[in-house]
Structures are given as structure tokens and as C-alpha cells.
Amino acid sequence: MKNKKQVTIFEGQKIRRHWDDKIEKWFFSVVDVVEILTQSDRPRKYWNDLKIKLKAEGSELSEKIGQLELVLNMLAETFTTEISKKDEPKNFEENKKVARKGGAVAGVARKKLEKSIGRSVVQGEIF
């Protein structure tokens, strides 16, 4: 199965993937995942903008966090921000509810993706 490139289907859309025999691990196209989860017309730009935002905030891609996991974390943050704009929380408890809603949206997307690809996208402890 050396350097085998394939496509898998998630939510009726294609996600490019690549099997690396040396480390026995699948790699998935982050841009394809971003396109499906965000429904963006310009997923590559969306992903690039998220990476720029993350870098500006002082975050960096850790070896312990894979790109798919990072995408899901950033999507949770994006969903939380959008929900916060809509709900306009007034205190700490309302902010916690908004954060749970944003995290839940990304959590559902993560579970669907994991079910589709047959493995966890979370690669171990983050901290």
C-alpha cells in the first residue's frame, strides 16, 4: 500500500487522503475537511485566514495536535464567536452556555468525521 492516495466520502463529499507506509498513518486533506465543515466556497482561503489568525494570537501548531484537530478547535472557536454575536451573553454563565454550544457544533462534526474515516482525529493529550 506504499504511497497510496485515495478519496473517502464524508457527508456525501470527497476528502482526499494519503497512506504513509513508513509510519502506518493516514493523512487527510485539511482543506477538504474545512470545505465540508464550514460549507465555504473558498476553503483554502478560509484555512489560510484561520492559520493567520491563530499565529497572530500567538498560537502555533504543536506536534501533539494534528491539523484536523486544530481545524476542529478553530471551528469551535469560530462557532462560539458567531453564537456570541447572536445571543449577546450578559454574564459569565451565559458565556459558558455559548461556549458549550460552539464546542458542541464542532464536537458533532468531529464525531461524524471520525465515524466516516473509522478512527479518532484526536491524537493524544493536548496539554
Image: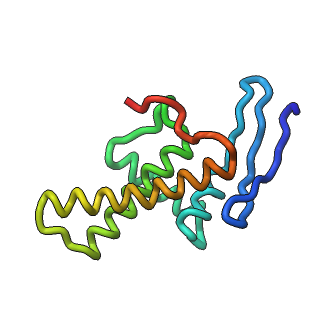
Quadrant into which the C terminus falls: top left
Q: What colouring method underlies this structural image? A: rainbow
Query: Hey, which quadrant is residue 27 in on the image?
Result: top right
Drawn side of residue 38 relative to residue 60, left or right:
right
Residue at the farthest top position: 22
Establish if 40 lies above or below 3: below
Q: What residue appears at the point 52 percent right and 56 percent down from the top-left corner?
A: 48
Image location (x, y in percent) of residue 28: 68, 46
Establish if 94 lies above or below 54: below
Image location (x, y in percent) of residue 97: 25, 61
Residue at the farthest bottom position: 86
Query: Hey, which quadrant is residue 112 in on the image?
Result: bottom right
| Image label count | 0
Q: What residue appears at the point 52 percent right and 62 percent down from the top-left corner?
A: 46
Image location (x, y in percent) of residue 110: 53, 52
Residue at the farthest left position: 91
Q: What residue appears at the point 28 percent right and 76 percent down from the top-left corner?
A: 86
Image location (x, y in percent) of residue 96: 22, 56
Quadrant into which the N terminus falls: top right
Drawn side of residue 33 relative to residue 80, left or right:
right
Q: Nearer the viewer, residue 98 or 22?
A: 98
Drawn side of residue 55 relative to residue 3, left or right:
left
